């Protein structure tokens, strides 16, 4: 019964914590799943939900994405988490050397928000 309830909860969650197993779920998959982070972040309705420290393992890989807009979005979302996102600081500091000026500026703003 537990597995059925957990599976159903995962399937229905856009983003959040499963009430049965406690894993962070995005689009019906847990953080252990391989996600196309670029496609995930392109969905406007999910951006507002990804401002919890549990989202950091999902967002950090996006900081290395080939698309500059995806890197900026991930940095912005991590910055919104604030001081709880300290584990993302090393990855954000790498972005300070990014080829894209907007990515560098966004990374610096996120670092400032985390280190406040």
Image (cartoon, helix red, strand yellow):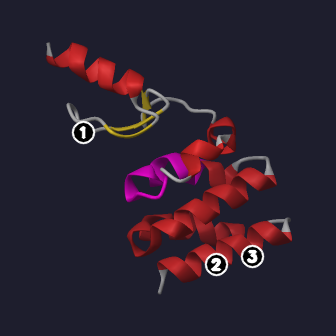
- Camera-side residue: 16 or 22? 16
The correct choice, above or below, for 29 with respect to 105 in the image is above
Q: Is residue 109 visible?
A: yes
How far from the left and from the top, in percent, is residue 79?
55, 69
Task: Evaluate if marks 2 and 1 touch, with contact meaning CB atoms under 8 Å apart.
Answer: no
Percent x, y for residue 114? Answer: 49, 77
Q: Residues within 10 Å of mark 3 (few under 14, many from 20)?
A: some
Q: Quadrant of residue 93?
A: bottom right
- Residue at mark 3 to residue at mark 2: CA–CA distance: 6 Å
* Mark linked to residue 93: none
- Classify mark 2: helix, strand or loop: helix
Chief secondary structure of the magenta portion: helix
Q: Which span is picked out in magenta?
A: 50-61
- Residue that numbered label 1 is attached to: 22
**Image point 64% across, 78% down: which residue?**
109
Residue pictured at 57% horizontal, 50% vertical: 47
How many labels sit on residues?
A: 3
Residue 6 lies in quadrant: top left
Q: Secondary structure at mark 3?
A: helix
> Which numbered disc flags the more N-terminal residue, 2 or 1?
1
Residue annotated with mark 3: 105
Identify the residue at image location x=22%, y=32%: 21
Q: Are marks 1 and 3 in contact (CB under 8 Å)?
A: no
Q: Is residue 66 left or right of residue 76?
A: right
Q: Position of residue 2 (x, y in %)?
A: 15, 19
Of residues 35 and 15, the one nearer the viewer is 15
Is residue 97 something that shows in the picture? no
Helix, strand or loop for disc 1:
loop
**10 Å neighbourhood of mark 2: few (<14), some, or many (≥20)?**
some
Q: Which residue is mark 2?
A: 109
- Of residues 13 and 33, which is closer to you in this image? 13
């Amino acid at each position: 019964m537990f597995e059925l309830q957990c599976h159903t909860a995962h399937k229905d969650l856009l983003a959040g914590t499963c009430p049965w197993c406690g894993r962070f779920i995005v689009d019906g998959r847990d953080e252990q799943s391989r996600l196309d982070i670029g496609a995930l972040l392109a969905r406007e309705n999910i951006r507002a939900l990804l401002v919890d420290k549990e989202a950091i393992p999902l967002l950090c890989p996006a900081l290395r994405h080939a698309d500059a807009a995806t890197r900026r979005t991930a940095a912005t979302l991590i910055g919104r988490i604030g001081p709880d996102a300290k584990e993302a600081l090393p990855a954000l500091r790498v972005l300070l050397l990014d080829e894209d000026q907007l990515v560098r500026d966004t990374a610096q703003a996120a670092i400032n928000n985390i280190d406040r």
